[in-house]
Amino acid sequence: MDFYMARWVWQKRYRAAFYGFKRTYISEKNCNQMPRRRLSSDGFKLFNMAYNPMPPPHVIKRMLSCLFHSEYDDKLMEMTDQCLQASKQLFAYSGDPIRKGFINQFIDNSIMNVIYAILSKDGDLANLHQMRRNYLYFMDVLDAAHRNGDHNTAIMLRCALEHHALKQLKFKLRKKDIQIFKDLEEEYGTWRNCYKNHLKMAMNTDDIDIIPSMMVLQMHIARHKAYSTIGQCRLKYEPFYIQGKIGRYAIEHVQEQYSEILPLYEEPLIKKSTDLIMIAQQVK
């Protein structure tokens, strides 16, 4: 009996501790009111100053860029800009009476230089991990160039990344890389149909900011000449129409004609595909 009496006294005296919470009295007067804030008036003003007024969108964008921007993004942007300049330079060379004869050679050089850059690191043969990292880097350049309308770079990089020297290494691709290849095949076509979808887009666009693929345009000019010799030419676009399109871009980017040739078009260290395939087979 003494135990129960002591428990009842302890329960009445230390009600909050017994029930595990503190009960508060709510009268009819304050039952619909918000709980009293515990922040001082000065602190409340400082809190409002931090969020009011709302900063303009360009400030928010700059803040987010600083938070999530990295050195890799800077290198990616720099390479994308250089590739865009190289694409403009290639069209400018079509208006040069001397360099226009080397355009196809410049295209081949660019593909071979990209493949060699993926296989090497600081002039030496890279290991498999370094090669995959280089491969994914150029995949990001391809994606950025495609989004910027530089289809010349996008198709050139696609040809390089699908070269047998790299395909035999069987790099594990990211999900977005698989989707990029799928989207490009639907948009451009493949080498089996000479990228006819891209040719149709290039010949029907008036947007001078979109850079078409010089490789595709030159391919269809040569294709027309080859078919015309056997009397079975049924191609939609005559060579002079395609050359006219090339000439328009040459005039638009004529200032690039006087720039020094970019490293992308320089003579590659490895000039044969078979040599690149044999080099790739030595990777460990």
Image: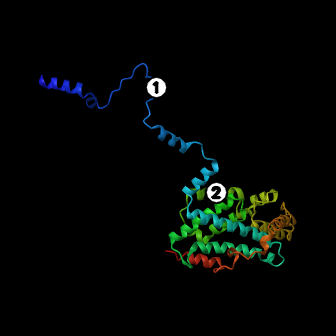
Q: Where is residue 116 in the image (x, y as percent from the top left)?
A: 61, 75
Q: Nearer the viewer, residue 79 or 119?
A: 79
Q: Which residue lies under the disc numbered 2?
A: 182
Q: Which residue lies under the disc numbered 1?
A: 33
Residue 273 found in image quarter: bottom right
Q: Residue at x 69, y 80 (%)?
A: 267
Q: Nearer the viewer, residue 227 or 259?
A: 259
Q: Position of residue 87 (x, y in %)?
A: 73, 68
Q: Position of residue 189 (x, y in %)?
A: 71, 59
Identify which amino acid the numbered label 2 is placed on: Lys
The secondary structure type at the circle numbered 2 is helix
Q: How crowded is mark 2: few (under 14 residues within 10 Å), some or many (20 or more)?
A: few
Q: How crowded is mark 1: few (under 14 residues within 10 Å), some or many (20 or more)?
A: few
Residue 10 vertical position relative to residue 85 in the rendered view, above or below: above
Residue projecting furthest to the left:
2
| Marks 2/1: CA–CA distance | 60 Å
Left or right? Give the position of 123 relative to 219: left
Query: Disc count in the image?
Result: 2
Residue 133 found in image quarter: bottom right
